[in-house]
Image (cartoon, rainbow, N blue to C red):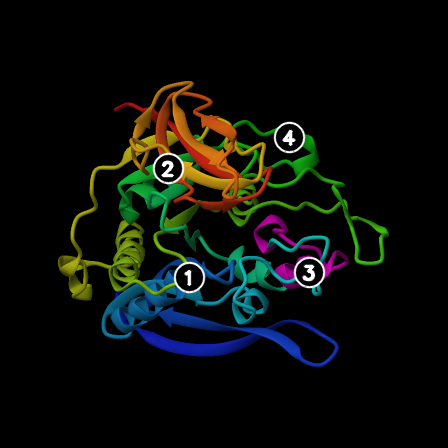
């Protein structure tokens, strides 16, 4: 590998077309000397703003340093959801798959979002490693999620440097999704093949192409990939964005792309010791609608025991208690509704099992 001053280039990549306009994304390439390629994307979900904010800070760093290899950056992967200020893509574009992080690697003859993703997949799949930046709710632990037994991805997660590393999927093979089964929390993995959603006119849409998260699709392609859940969605948080930029730089250093001669690595703080969690406990779902109030001793990061009360759902007008939400297992709360209006079937808490602590 050879470290050389970074050359930056911006291009526009067309992904698809609505009846009246093109759908495209901005792609940044930071090229130095010979070396690996790392792909970084953000804003698969339109309200997750600290990913693009982190990549702006990364841009300022990379343009002022030396680099071995190439960094490919897509700051806003899903402009449809971003412009709509929406978590998922509005149903008007794709009622079959509104969550773009369930349609990788896409399909040329699939739904609208599958076709969009297929146009970007060739870019992502050309990399040697990848980082998918997300932003959790204010009531979620900042963490990096990896596939179980993916040692290369685990090394990337350790280098990125969040306090928690979450194992969210069972081992993933290179077989097609229909040939393998998943272990772990189904809430984070993809829908099964052939899932059916009603279109607006009431007809069934069936797509048999693979439909899974970016992390799993990339892992299946044997490209080590991490999903980063930064903090505080919907607003730009300077400290969160800064941690995101530093984390990406630490991954580049781990890949040998930033060296001492690059004049940047000595400015990076060392990553913290990561606590490892396994996402193997079913999520806590409220069976009733109402106002959810967490228990006084339950906060994100708290350790709870099986059967412990997490909160109560009650009628805000009559004050009648509709449901008591209890922990389905012992572990650490990594996501918890901060309290507010909830609807039956909504997730109010997620708990993971500590490993090695």
Q: Earlier in the sequence, mark 1 or mark 4?
A: 4
Q: Earlier in the sequence, mark 4 or mark 2?
A: 4
Q: Earlier in the sequence, mark 3 or mark 2?
A: 3
Q: Earlier in the sequence, mark 3 or mark 4?
A: 3
Residue ID at (62%, 59%): 117
Q: Earlier in the sequence, mark 1 or mark 2?
A: 1
How many residues crowd mark 2 within 10 Å: few (<14), some (14–19), many (20+)? many
State the CA–CA distance, disc 1 to disc 2: 19 Å
Location of residue 309 with respect to 333 vertically, above or below? above
The residue identified by callout 2 is 334
Q: Is residue 98 left or right of residue 123?
A: right
Q: Nearer the viewer, mark 3 or mark 4?
A: 3
Asked where in the image residue 232 lies, by quadrant, the reply is bottom left
The residue identified by callout 4 is 180
Secondary structure at numbered mark 3 = loop
Indicate the position of residue 26 as horizontal and vertical percent values: 49, 74
**Contact? badges 4 and 2 (CB < 8 Å):** no
The residue identified by callout 3 is 91
**Contact? badges 1 and 4 (CB < 8 Å):** no
State the CA–CA distance, disc 3 to disc 4: 29 Å
Magenta range: 100-118
Indicate the position of residue 47 as horizontal and vertical percent values: 47, 61
State the CA–CA distance, disc 4 to disc 2: 28 Å
How many residues crowd mark 1 within 10 Å: few (<14), some (14–19), many (20+)? some
Residue ID at (54%, 42%): 216
Location of residue 48 with respect to 291 vertically, above or below? below
The residue identified by callout 1 is 234
Residue ID at (72%, 56%): 95
State the CA–CA distance, disc 3 to disc 2: 29 Å
Q: Nearer the viewer, mark 1 or mark 4?
A: 1
């Amino acid at each position: 590998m050879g470290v050389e001053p970074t050359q930056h280039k911006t291009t526009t990549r067309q992904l698809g077309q609505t009846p009246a306009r093109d759908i495209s994304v901005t792609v940044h390439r930071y090229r130095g000397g010979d070396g690996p390629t790392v792909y970084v994307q953000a804003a698969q979900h339109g309200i997750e703003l600290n990913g693009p904010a982190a990549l702006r800070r990364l841009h300022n760093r990379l343009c002022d340093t030396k680099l071995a290899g190439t960094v490919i950056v897509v700051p806003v992967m899903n402009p449809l959801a971003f412009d709509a200020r929406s978590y998922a893509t509005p149903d008007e574009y794709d009622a079959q798959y509104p969550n773009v992080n369930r349609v990788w690697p896409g399909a040329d003859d699939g739904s609208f979002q599958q076709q969009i993703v297929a146009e970007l997949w060739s870019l992502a799949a050309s990399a040697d490693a990848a980082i998918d930046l997300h932003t959790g709710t204010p009531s979620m632990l900042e963490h990096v999620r990896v596939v179980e037994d993916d040692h290369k991805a685990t090394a990337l997660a350790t280098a990125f440097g969040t306090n928690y590393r979450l194992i969210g999927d069972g081992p993933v093979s290179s077989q097609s999704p229909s040939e393998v089964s998943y272990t772990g929390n189904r809430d984070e993995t993809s829908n099964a093949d052939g899932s059916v959603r009603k279109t607006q006119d009431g007809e069934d849409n069936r797509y048999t192409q693979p439909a899974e998260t970016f992390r799993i699709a990339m892992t299946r392609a044997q490209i080590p990939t991490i999903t980063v859940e930064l903090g505080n969605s919907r607003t730009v948080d300077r400290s969160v964005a800064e941690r995101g930029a530093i984390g990406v730089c630490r991954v580049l250093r781990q890949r040998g792309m930033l060296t001492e001669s690059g004049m940047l690595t000595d400015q990076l703080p060392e990553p913290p010791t990561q606590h490892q969690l396994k996402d193997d406990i079913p999520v806590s779902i409220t069976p009733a609608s109402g106002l959810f109030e967490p228990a006084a001793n339950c906060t994100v990061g708290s350790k709870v025991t099986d059967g412990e009360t997490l909160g109560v759902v009650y009628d805000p007008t009559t004050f009648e208690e509709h449901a008591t939400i209890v922990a389905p297992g012992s572990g650490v709360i990594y996501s918890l509704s901060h309290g507010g209006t909830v609807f039956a079937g909504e997730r109010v808490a997620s708990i993971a099992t500590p490993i090695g602590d």
